[in-house]
Image: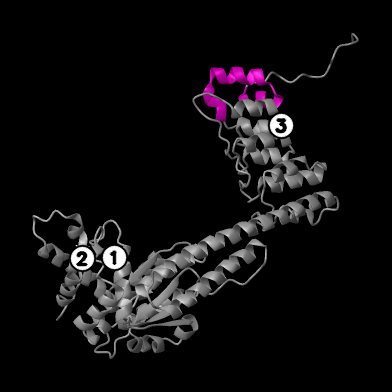
Amino acid sequence: MPPGVDHRVRPARPTTVHGFVQLGDLSGLQKKLAENPSLLNERNEIMVQTPLHVASGYNNVGIVKFLLNWNGPDKVELEAKNMYGETPLHMAAKNGCSEAAELLIQHGAIIEARANNGMTPLHLAVWHALHAEDPSTVGTLLKHNADCSLVDDEGVTPLNLLSKASNGGKLQQLLQRHAEEQRRRKALEICKDATAKMAEFETAMATIVGLEEIKSQLHRWAKGMLMDERRRSLGLKIAPRRPPHMAFLGSPGTGKTMIARLLGKLLHMVGFLPTDRVTEVQRTDLVGEFVGHTGPKTRRKLEQAEGGILFVDEAYRLIPMQKSDDKDYGLEALEEIMSVMDTGKIVVIFAGYEEPMKRVITSNEGFYRRVTKFFHFKDFSTSELSQILHLKMVDTEVGSSLYGFRLHPSCTNEAVTQLIETETTEQQRKEMNGGLIEPMLINARENLDHRLGFDCIDTDDLLTITMEDLRAGLQLLRR
């Protein structure tokens, strides 16, 4: 054969966008897309990869740039996934294509994207570095703060991949150094976040009148749970806290529902519960009239409350004082609630008068094992009721019947305390507690309207509730 002739078989000219990308033929790719722009994110057979997957996996940097900067009607799918759930960044990482990885990250690729097996690009980059002895792609990902602590579906971190390798010394040092720096940075962020959360919580507690013992306990819980959050951020393994099921014992209007709502926000804020939802129920929401109705009815409410707090108000009504017949199913509802209290999916608060609640506490042998916190809500003093009134007037929201109104300067805390003392009975205060204030103020506003004439144009007079109005507001509550 004549000398100088190359007898190797040359590959056929590609015909697909994927073929042009694989060969690094940018001009051929440009021509193909000019003819049919819809091929930009075309998936190939079997592997289900886009052109960007292929370009990234072959480190064809010029083509990666071209695809990322495409100005056609469609945009390149940066997070498209192939049959293994891998994005283009996964492809660059698993093949040691550091330059392609850098470009993808600069254009917003998700550095912690997960493949079908839970692996991140860093997992794959470490795997490649071990076999190719080239840590450059690992370095690129770490430069952009790839998380060294993430685990795949088998619970393996990128560092764990090195544990059985004999040639991963330098790589292991690189990852460990980065992981330690990440832990320190995360701990500082969590410390700052915890301080802000604690301040927010204390601001909310400052609006609550009285209940010092309960507020102190909530403060301890908040700090403890935030400390747990910090421990976990440092990689420490600690036991999870048990759901803090509680009993709130006291008269109506003593703040039980308000504290339950604050507690919902607290447990959600510190990550103990996924939502701050408080589902309030009474006997009628749980108990059916016939055999077979109570179980499903109660379970529906439990499903509704899952992830938050179930607040069972007047819980003693579930256990009647004495059975008049065999058709009371309150105990069945209580047993349904007890059955989910160990799952960790819900926090339950039972609330009601102290004496009647003893029937609930003694009706189920598992009650004391599950309900570990008992809080006693004392009746409000007249001074505390006055404080509640002033806070309510300061914190009126749009939509409130008192929004825009204010108290006259003569309505001092001392004056309102004395007014409540003289215009209400001890029995009335004991039965209503904080529930006295809202109707008192609504009545006071109505008295203001009655007192003023249509010819009044003074804006202060139109919006100012006086001691006279407050007195009338209380007198209208007399029975």
**Is 28 placed above or below 380 here?**
above
| Secondary structure character of the magenta stretch overall | helix
**Residue labelled with disc 3:** 59
Is 37 in front, or is 232? 232
Q: How far apart are marks 2 and 1 (CA)?
A: 10 Å
Is 61 in front, or is 302? 61
Query: Magenta stretch?
Result: 16-41
Sequence-wise, the earlier of marks 3 and 1 is 3
Residue 334 pos. (x, y %) = 38, 79
Magenta region includes residue 419: no
Residue type pointed to by label 2: Ile
**Mark 1 Cα within 10 Å, few/some/many (few <14, many 20+)?**
some
Residue 403 pos. (x, y %) = 26, 59
**Residue labelled with disc 2:** 465
* Residue sitting at x 48%, y 82%: 372
Q: Can residue 105 be seen in this view?
A: yes
- Relative placement, left or right, of 89 versus 375 is right
Q: Is residue 287 visible?
A: no
Between disc 3 and disc 1, the foreground one is 1
* Residue sitting at x 72%, y 41%: 140
Which quarter shows the C terminus? bottom left
Between disc 2 and disc 1, the foreground one is 2
Instruction: Identify the element where label 1 is drawn.
Output: helix
**Is 35 placed above or below 215 here?**
above
- Pointers 2 and 1 in contact (C-beta within 8 Å): yes
Sequence-wise, the earlier of marks 2 and 1 is 1
Q: How far apart are marks 3 and 2 (CA)?
A: 75 Å
Instruction: Identify the element where label 3 is drawn.
Output: loop
Residue 177 pos. (x, y %) = 76, 53
**Residue labelled with disc 1:** 393
